[in-house]
Amino acid sequence: MTLATDTGNETVRARPQYCPRCDTEYQPAAVAICESCLGPLEPAYLAERALPDRATIAERAPNLWRYREWLPFDGEPRWSRETGFTPLFEVPSLARLLGVARVWVKNDSVSHPSLSFKDRVVACAINAAAALGIDTIGCASTGNLANAVAAQAARAGLPAWIFVPEDLEPGKLVGTAIYGAHLVRIRGTYDDVNRLCARVADEFGWGVVNVNLRGYYGEGSKTMAFEIAEQLGWRLPTAVVVPMAGGSLITKIRKGFDEFRSAGLVDGKPPRLFGAQAAGCAPIVNLIEGGGDRVEPVVPRTIARSIAIGNPADGPRAARAIRETGGWAAAVTDEELVGGIRLLAEHAGVFTETAGGVTLAAALGLSGNGRLRADDEVVLCITGNGLKTVEAVGDVLTGAPVIAAKLGEVRELVRIAHEEVQP
Ligand SMILES: *Cc1c(COP(=O)(O)O)cnc(C)c1O
Ligand SMILES: [Zn+2]
């Protein structure tokens, strides 16, 4: 691999990794798969390390590094120090709509800097790259990861090579190219892109964030669980609804809740985890409903491109997280997800992208079939921003009248609007 000549900051060091399957240990490196058993590697933390208490965490700056003892580095993070700590807020009218006790939105649609939860994982990956002296980073992406890598690489002054399926939404493509990244569109599905990127990582020695840096990258997702627990006042909800693509986020949210429980920062039962997918690409939902333990890959057909992964790498682990917490999964049609986007905007004042529409629509389905219950306290993980997928909801514009700049015309519109409310 290429070593960066700029070693100006020696303070961020990557943790070693290990293979949970066969216990082999690995020195810090851009490697994500165990050589002996091909299992995915995970960062190794020292069990005896000092952990902060609630008050210590609460005093720290409002970003994801306030949980640094649970992130795979020693020393000071070098890049992306402002990411994380997005708003969590209660929406009583959604609780009424879902027929549950309480509902909160965890709003990563306003994540810094690229408006999706992928900023969390890239914040970890780019510090791993810095620690390992990697001078070029890249990714295989369904859109949001492309935006996050391009933005954070620009800030860090690193070249980025970004590979996406050819037919992504314009918002996602523009939101990558604007940062000056090398954006490459592949004729094929995300799964084709991902296979190519495994070979690209080997060939060029780059840090491909979700390929050879994946062990470090994935840990960033845990911070969504940490923030939910802290922002609820150091307690756990009873249910969390999470959109699933490769299945990593939901797996890591579970790990995050478990780590905070073992650290004594929260108590009570772990939340039941509920996975959401689009019906046009629902291999993990199929696994939950079908009851097996092997993912049956599908060819994605949905407008929810950001979560359209037909052969999810963490599918079996996601299914385990769902089953072992007593949760369930739901798939929704494209029409239902568009309804979900509109409902979230109208009730919560949050404009989310297609994946967020999937999350709310799935929550509706899960309350309809009794999986979410009247006494549940539910957090909806809203992971991306609607301005990136405006074409999904273009219809809302048809209702906006065009008038002359005359008060009389406004009077007429107001009269009609009142009549519509009270006929
Ligand atoms: C990537 C992504 C997810 C889920 O990702 P996993 O691969 O399951 O970790 C959810 N929502 C959005 C908007 C995403 O971009
Ligand atoms: Zn192994």
Image: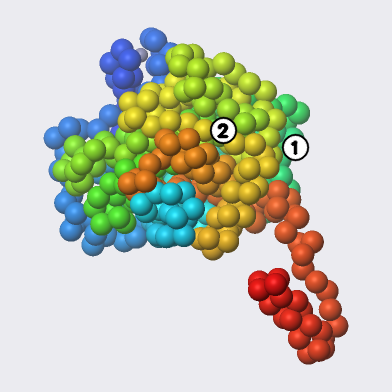
Kindly identify the residue that appears in the image at 53 percent across and 60 percent down: 347
The amino acid type found where label 1 is placed reads: Asp
- Residue 128 is left or right of residue 188, and the answer is left
The type of residue carrying mark 2 is Ala
Q: Earlier in the sequence, mark 2 or mark 1?
A: 1
Which residue has dot 1 on it? 167
Q: Quadrant of the C terminus?
A: bottom right
List x then y, in percent, for residue 195: 61, 22
- Residue 230 in picture, x, y percent from top left: 28, 53
Q: Residue furthest front?
A: 423
- Helix, strand or loop under label 2: strand
How crowded pointer 1 is (Cα within 10 Å; few <14, some 14-19, many 20+) is rated as: some
- Looking at the image, the residue that sits furthest to the right is 404
Q: Give me the residue at 58% from left, 61% from top.
A: 346
Residue 159 circle label: none
Quick check: is the Cβ at mark 2 less than 8 Å away from ligand 1? no
Scheme of colours in the image: rainbow
Determine the quadrant in which ligand 2 lies.
Answer: top left
Residue 149 visible at all:
no
Q: Nearer the viewer, residue 386 or 201?
A: 386
Crowding near the residue tagged with mark 2, few <14, some 14–19, many ≥20 C-alpha atoms within 10 Å: many
Residue at left 37%, top 53%?
102
Q: Which of the two marks, 2 or 1, is nearer to us in this view?
A: 2
Horizontal side, residue 42 vs residue 210: left or right: left
Label 2, label 1: how far apart the Cα atoms are: 23 Å
Number of callouts: 2
Q: Quadrant of the rendered structure where residue 396 is?
A: bottom right
Seen from this angle, which residue lies furthest bottom?
Answer: 407
Left or right relative to 264: residue 153: right
| Label drawn at residue 331 | 2
Is there CB contact under 8 Å for labels 2 and 1?
no
User: Residue 217 at x, y = what percent?
Assistant: 43, 36
